[in-house]
């Protein structure tokens, strides 16, 4: 059995108190929401905070409301509660699909949307016990000097594995970060960067307090599809989020395809316009979009499933996601 190392717990009841604690303790502290990712990482000694700043008493981070053109979602909403919320179900079906496929039911009750957005990256060589990692001489992400995925590599390429991230990217969400030095908002695109050691632009003294999602434009369709070994619990081996805007005749004026679990950040698949712009998304168009996505995605051996298989699955899952989004539209049109 893996034991938790000793640490102190602070339980602030306001955002101001929480960010003051993070500023005071610096890199010795970590914020914790549901703890479903941080706790296992502490048992594995991947994270070794001396002070855990528990966010669970901060009621101001549990609000959810429409404000003008946006929906503001407090970062402490559990994945379970979010997936059942009528406003989220009506406005953001792809987000419901993503959060309802995170882990299993118990973890979705404890796990929060903020913790999901801020989830640490994963790799077959890091999500192991300290003893296991020591036997291999550790690695760049923690305690070591080499990468076991990319021989001679100088950067960690551990995989972004949060299901909500690619969906929030397609939805054009913004993330509100607060610290003792002020507040700022980043797009999801800006929030993540390509560094498996810490793939976020969030400073360690900042907390994510709110996710701001623009309400859907008329004609918007979206879906999320996830590849995983055990549908009841596993992290994504591939996650594909799609969002398209169609005119009354079904022609696409906008299409976004974002993938996760292939690299250290969720990735927007670029240069798809020639395949869809002004076209009806019929089988041939969907085939061309899916093939273009497959060509542009190059998975690494950072998780257990074969990269070549995952690359082929990009095409399959882009197709499935687009078909699911379209069938939802047909259903809505009656
Ligand atoms: C068996 C198992 C299977 C899992 N499967 C999946 C899966 O399929 N898909 C998936 O996406 N996740 C999965 N997870 C991971 C996790 O359960 C979820 O991502 C969950 O949403 C994390 O939320 P949390 O509130 O528990 O985060 P925590 O564990 O509390 O925090 C996660 C990280 O975010 C930071 N953090 C948390 N909240 C904030 C905040 N408001 N501001 C700033 N930083 C913050 C913490 O410091 C920590 O680094 C799995 C976990 C387990 C144990
Ligand atoms: S990608 Fe390389 S450096 Fe990063 S966790 Fe895996 S083995 Fe370690």
Image: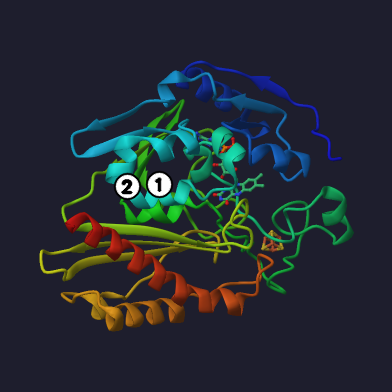
Mark 2, residue position: 92
Picture disc at residue 41: none
Q: Is residue 100 visible?
A: yes
Q: Vertically, is 42 above or below 152?
A: above
Q: Give the percent coordinates (x, y) of residue 328.
A: 29, 58
Ligand 1 near label 1 (Cβ, under 8 Å)? no
| Picture quadrant where residue 253 is located | bottom left
Q: Residues within 10 Å of mark 2 (few under 14, many from 20)?
A: many
- Residue at 67% x, 70% y is 153
Q: Are marks 2 and 1 in contact (CB under 8 Å)?
A: yes
CB at disc 2 and ligand 1 closer than 8 Å: no
Residue 271 as seen in the image, left or right of residue 106: left
Residue drawn at x 37%, y 53% as measured from the top left: 94
Residue at 73% over, 46% down: 46
Secondary structure of residue under mark 2: loop
Which residue carries the number 1 mark?
96
Pinpoint residue 161: horizontal percent, then vertical percent: 56, 55
Q: Is residue 47 visible?
A: no
């Amino acid at each position: 059995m893996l034991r938790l190392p000793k640490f102190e717990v602070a339980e602030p009841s306001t955002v101001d108190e929480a960010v003051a604690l993070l500023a005071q303790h610096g890199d010795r502290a970590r914020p914790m929401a549901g703890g479903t990712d941080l706790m296992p990482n502490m048992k594995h000694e991947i994270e070794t905070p001396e002070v855990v700043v528990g966010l669970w008493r901060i009621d101001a981070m549990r609000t959810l409301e429409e404000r003008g053109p946006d929906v503001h979602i407090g970062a402490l909403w559990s994945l379970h509660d979010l997936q059942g919320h009528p406003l989220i179900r009506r406005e953001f079906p792809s987000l419901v699909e993503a959060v309802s496929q995170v882990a299993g039911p118990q973890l979705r009750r404890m796990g929060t949307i903020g913790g999901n957005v801020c989830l640490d990256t994963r790799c077959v060589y890091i999500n192991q016990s300290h003893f296991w990692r020591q036997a291999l001489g550790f690695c760049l992400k923690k305690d070591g000097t080499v990468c076991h995925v990319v021989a001679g590599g100088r950067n960690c390429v551990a995989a972004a594995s949060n299901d909500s991230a690619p969906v929030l990217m397609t939805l054009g969400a913004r993330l509100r970060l607060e610290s003792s030095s002020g507040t700022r908002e980043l797009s999801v695109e800006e929030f993540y960067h390509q560094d498996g050691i810490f793939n976020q632009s969030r400073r360690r003294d900042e907390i994510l307090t709110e996710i701001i999602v623009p309400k859907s434009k008329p004609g918007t369709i979206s879906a999320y599809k996830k590849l995983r070994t055990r549908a009841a619990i596993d992290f994504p081996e591939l996650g594909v989020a799609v969002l398209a805007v169609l005119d009354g005749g079904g022609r696409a004026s906008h299409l976004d395809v974002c993938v996760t679990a292939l690299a250290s950040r969720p990735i927007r698949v670029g240069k798809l316009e020639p395949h869809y712009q002004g076209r009806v998304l019929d089988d041939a168009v969907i085939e061309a979009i899916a093939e273009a996505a497959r060509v542009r995605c190059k998975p690494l051996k950072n998780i257990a499933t074969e990269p070549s298989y995952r690359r082929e699955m990009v095409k399959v899952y882009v197709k499935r996601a687009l078909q699911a989004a379209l069938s939802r539209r047909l259903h809505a049109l009656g």
